[in-house]
Amino acid sequence: MKKALLYFLLILNLTACGTSKSVRHVPDIKQYSLEIPEVNKINDSTFSFSQNYLTKNKQQLWELYIKGNPLQLGYNNGALTQDLMQKQEEIFFSKVEGFVPSKFKQKLLRGFLKWYNRKMYLNVRDDYQAELYGLSQYSSDKYDFIAPKFLRSMYLHGAHDIGHAMQDLMMVGCSSLAVWNENSEDGDLLIGRNFDFYVGDEFAKNKLIEFVEPENGIPYMSVSWPGMIGVVSGMNKEGITVTINAGKSKIPLTAKTPISLVTREILQYARNIDEAIAIAKKRRVFVSESILVGSANDKNAVIIEVSPDNFGVYKVENSNKIFCTNHFQSEAYKDDKRNQKHIVESHSEYRYEKLQELLQENQKLNPEKMASILRDKSGLKGEKIGYGNEKALNQLLAHHAVIFSPEKKLVWVSSNPYQLGEFVCYDLNEIFSDKRLQNGKFAKSELNIAKDPFIDSQEFENYEIYKLMQSEIISAIEKDDVLLSEDFTKEYQSLNPDFWLGYYLAGKYYFKQKEYSKAKVEFEMALTKEITTVPDKENVEKYLKKTLKKLN
């Protein structure tokens, strides 16, 4: 996980301008009228400009409402979220300084990557470029050495794509499902998803729920973070929903259309599944991605599977449920060797089977039951596999979870920590109407879903301490001047006793200290647990073999 994060953040921080042509590129904004926002600060957590608002609710979720032409949308977004956006940018870039303090290495990587995004602007719609230009005017000056504000803002929209495209360094393990007819309590379409995208706790702290009313197209809502105009989870006023799950990708040679801008286009312009498919099909992406699309007008859901050189649509026949993890299921990918290998070696198939198992146990889902599924921390057949295991649906690292009821136009969004906090309900029919403007409220709080009782448990407290202690044991493995007591490793493992990683890391620490008998015990114990992936298990076995050689 740390290695994945390192490479991901390196790409983010060190992506510089491309060719001389791209470095000079700015979008044509002359066609758009613009009113420079003058933000009214009502209090520390509520801001407004004309009919645009930013406020923080009691669940600590930021709620943003903006409207206007593309350029105006960007300016309104940037003016209202400037402090949040600049803080988010700082979180991204400050991490690299910790991981790669060497200025020389940063310069080398910057030289290698400076051409990487040279063609991205050729693959991003002109109106989205105008919106990004407006948004970028409120970015920090601090990082202008990386790239000019507009290009930097556009490049950051490829972060999700590049993060999971690094070969064998996937850092996302999202799960989603849709049910309808006999599989939902009222027969309506119901969709749930976990967005397991982790760039640290600070990154996930300021979640932003955007309600966007564009001059052209369909009003929509989206859940992401400040500085983002793309969509990773969202629903429009017509009842079209999109959620994205990373597939297995090779490292792309050049950036094209970020997947979050493809899904944004679907929400803004599609009213049914066929229109969503047509939009996805015409865009050139640079990673592999599953897009679960739900439709109130079709009362159905499908998975659009895109990659740089292939395209497929997975539809279920004679069934009223569909599951999506991180492998492809359509006929177009049946002979894809990378996808087949991913099914065998990753945790995607395991979570897929867990979704099937939970739906059998919880038939006729309603929003509360859906939340329970998204929060499930166990393995197959209820096995204890340790907190934080990526084989669980709830890996205790999700940026957010969302539940959609497209026909009712209702959305539930989780609050911190992870997807354990209260799910806040929003009614798009009300929000995109005069009724919201009259009462000034976004949430439909009487329909909220209660927080998970696990938050108040000793196990959760132990897990939070375990995470802090894990950073110490990793530091001891990586550095030569950090020593741990045996009591430390035992306490660390006792806080999350069913998780294989605690024993593996202890084994690596003892191996480094040349305490091979202790290392052997730890590696053997790790192999008795549910290890996340085949490569992970092979690493444990490799270390055990090296340890046994040292002992003989």
Image (cartoon, grey):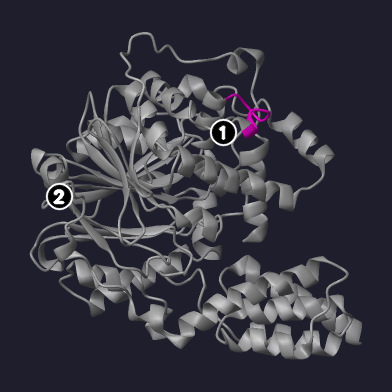
Query: Would residue 187 be seen by someone viewing this image from the given angle?
Result: yes
Q: Is residue 95 left or right of residue 51?
A: right
Q: Is residue 143 magenta?
A: yes
The residue shown at (33%, 9%) is 31
Q: Is residue 441 left or right of residue 142?
A: left
Question: Where, quadrant-wise, is the N terminus in this rendering?
Answer: bottom right
Name the spot of residue 514 as percent of width and height, x first: 89, 81
Label placed on residue 140: 1
The residue shown at (44%, 62%) is 398
User: What span is colored magenta in the figure?
Assistant: 142-148
In the depicted structure, whether residue 314 falls above or below residue 514:
above
Nearer-N-terminus badge (1/2)? 1
In the depicted structure, whether residue 66 falls above or below residue 96:
above
Question: Where, quadrant-wise, is the C terminus in this rendering?
Answer: bottom right
Q: Amino acid at mark 1?
A: Ser
**CA distance for labels 1 and 2:** 36 Å
Main structural element of the magenta stretch: helix, strand or loop? loop
Q: Amino acid at mark 2?
A: Lys
Pointer 2 local density, CA inside 10 Å: few below 14, some 14–19, many at least 20: many
Q: Is residue 472 magenta?
A: no
Residue that carries the numbered disc 2 in the rendered image: 409
Which structural element holds mark 2? Answer: loop
Which structural element holds mark 1? Answer: loop
The residue shown at (58%, 48%) is 91
Q: Nearer the viewer, residue 151 or 53?
A: 53
